Image (cartoon, grey):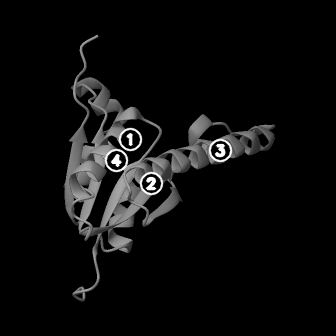
């Protein structure tokens, strides 16, 4: 699908509640959307993969429905808080034309699916900097996206800080 000369490419930035995610968003805004280049090269779409209430607690059986409704309400509050924080960061960097999508599911499939659906040219994700063992058990979202997303993938690493 060819873009017209007036259409901008879509850049998806994966966000979650982590510091690494917000570092990646801030880094991207600073590098691609400087005030000195008002003709921003991309339309920005922030995508948050909201866990399902059942995967968040892994609970089934009698009484699960009541617990799940509380968990679901909490997950919605978390999503709302993340979106507000991300939009505030964008606005503080004078990037006001930002779209946000909250999509329920596993971050790996949510982000790769959003790339396909929105015909994105670039996907930006933060790196949690897990070691090999943790990455084996948890699975790296950035690694999965780098191999499976049908666009360029930029993995932004948060600088190490000395404590």
> Foreground: 47 or 144?
47
Q: CA distance from mark 2 to mark 1?
A: 14 Å
Tell me which residue sits at (31%, 26%) in the image: 134
Task: Using the rendered image of the protein, determine whether residue 107 is visible from the camera's viewpoint.
Answer: no
Outermost residue on the front side: it is 36
Q: Which quadrant is home to the C terminus?
A: top left
Disc 3 designates what residue?
77
Closer to the eye: label 3 or 1: 1
Residue nearest the viewer, comparing 64 with 38: 38
**Looking at the image, is mark 2 or mark 4 earlier in the sequence?**
4
As helix, strand or loop, the secondary structure at mark 3 comes to helix
Q: Gap in Å between the C-alphas at discs 4 and 1?
A: 5 Å
Residue 148 against residue 64 in the figure, above or below: below
**Callout 2: SS:** helix
Q: Is residue 22 visible?
A: yes
In the image, taking residue 110 as reference, residue 5 lies left or right, namely left
What residue does disc 4 label?
A: 25
Which numbered dot is residue 22?
1
- Disc 4 and disc 3: Cα gap in Å? 21 Å
> Which secondary structure, mark 4?
helix
* Distance from Cα at disc 2 to Cα at disc 4: 12 Å
Pointer 3 or 2: first along the chain? 3
Residue 142: where, in percent of width, then height?
Answer: 27, 45
């Amino acid at each position: 699908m060819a873009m017209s000369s007036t259409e901008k490419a879509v850049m998806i930035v994966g966000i979650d509640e982590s510091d690494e995610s917000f570092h990646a968003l801030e880094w991207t805004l600073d590098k691609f959307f400087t005030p000195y280049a008002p003709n921003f090269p991309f339309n920005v779409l922030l995508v948050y993969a909201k866990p399902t209430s059942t995967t968040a607690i892994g609970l089934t059986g009698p009484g699960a429905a009541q617990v799940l409704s509380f968990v679901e309400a909490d997950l919605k509050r978390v999503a709302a808080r993340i979106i507000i924080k991300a939009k505030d960061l964008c606005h503080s960097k004078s990037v006001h034309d930002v779209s946000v999508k909250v999509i329920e599911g596993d971050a790996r499939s949510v982000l790769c699916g959003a790339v396909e659906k929105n015909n994105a040219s670039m996907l930006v994700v933060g790196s949690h900097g897990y070691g090999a063992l943790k990455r084996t058990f948890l699975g790296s979202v950035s690694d999965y996206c780098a191999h499976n997303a049908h666009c360029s993938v930029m993995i932004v690493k948060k600088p190490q800080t000395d404590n």
